């Protein structure tokens, strides 16, 4: 098992991103389609992790003037617990740091706060609901 991580540059890979997000967020977590596919996808940067030709992990980055927002990090159930989520998130962070971005924001599902704290992210503010799932805003500056 050697995952490959990349920035999405074509429609075929973007379809793989939507597939993983559909399985994880819409199917498993019952996020409504119109919330998951929110109209920001065509102005976002997408990241894809694959094993062979099989899509297994994804992330989405929204670029703003003063910060970037990393979101939609998802790993397919069969691939969880194998470090793929950590590798994918590290790949995304490294790419953005290399490009000169300095402030990072995420809306972390509450049960994943420790995961992001391990990358140096800090909770900002109180818990809130997003798609009926408890989240915290978290930030990190480089």
Image (tube, rainbow, N blue to C red):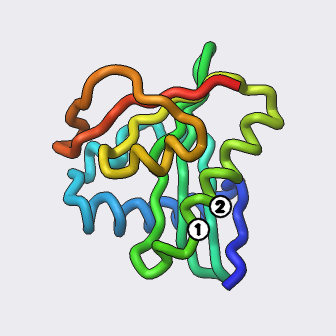
Report the side of 75 relative to 102 (left or right).
left
Closer-to-camera residue (28/126): 126
Tag 1, which secondary structure?
helix
Within-10-Å neighbours for mark 2: few <14, some 14–19, many 20+: some
Closer-to-camera residue (5/10): 5
Q: Indicate the position of residue 109 as horizontal and vertical percent values.
A: 33, 45
Q: Indicate the position of residue 5 as horizontal and vertical percent values.
A: 70, 63
Within-10-Å neighbours for mark 1: few <14, some 14–19, many 20+: many
19, above or below 58, in the image: below
The structure residue drawn at horizontal position 40% and vertical position 36%, both measured from the top left corner, is 107
Report the side of 114 relative to 32 (left or right).
right
Q: Calculate the distance from the C-alpha at mark 2 to the C-alpha at mark 1.
A: 5 Å
The structure residue drawn at horizontal position 63% and vertical position 73%, both measured from the top left corner, is 50
Tag 2, which secondary structure?
helix
The structure residue drawn at horizontal position 47% and vertical position 42%, both measured from the top left corner, is 71
* Residue designated by label 2: 87
The structure residue drawn at horizontal position 76% and vertical position 43%, both measured from the top left corner, is 95
Do labels 2 and 1 touch, CB within 8 Å?
Answer: yes
Q: Which mark is residue 84?
A: 1
Q: Indicate the position of residue 48 as horizontal and vertical percent values.
A: 62, 61
Q: Quadrant of residue 119?
A: top right
Q: Indicate the position of residue 16 as horizontal and vertical percent values.
A: 53, 67
């Amino acid at each position: 098992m050697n995952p490959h991580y990349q920035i999405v540059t074509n429609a075929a890979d973007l379809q793989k991103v939507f597939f993983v997000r559909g399985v994880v967020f819409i199917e498993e977590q019952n996020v409504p389609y119109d919330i998951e596919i929110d109209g920001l996808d065509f102005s976002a940067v997408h990241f894809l992790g694959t094993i062979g030709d099989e899509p297994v992990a994804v992330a989405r980055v929204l670029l703003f003037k003063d910060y970037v927002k990393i979101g939609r990090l998802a790993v397919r159930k069969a691939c969880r617990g194998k470090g793929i989520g950590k590798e994918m998130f590290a790949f995304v962070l490294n790419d953005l740091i290399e490009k000169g971005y300095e402030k990072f924001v995420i809306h972390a599902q509450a049960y994943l706060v420790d995961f992001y704290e391990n990358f140096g992210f800090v909770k900002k503010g109180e818990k809130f609901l997003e798609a009926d799932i408890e989240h915290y805003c978290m930030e990190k500056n480089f």
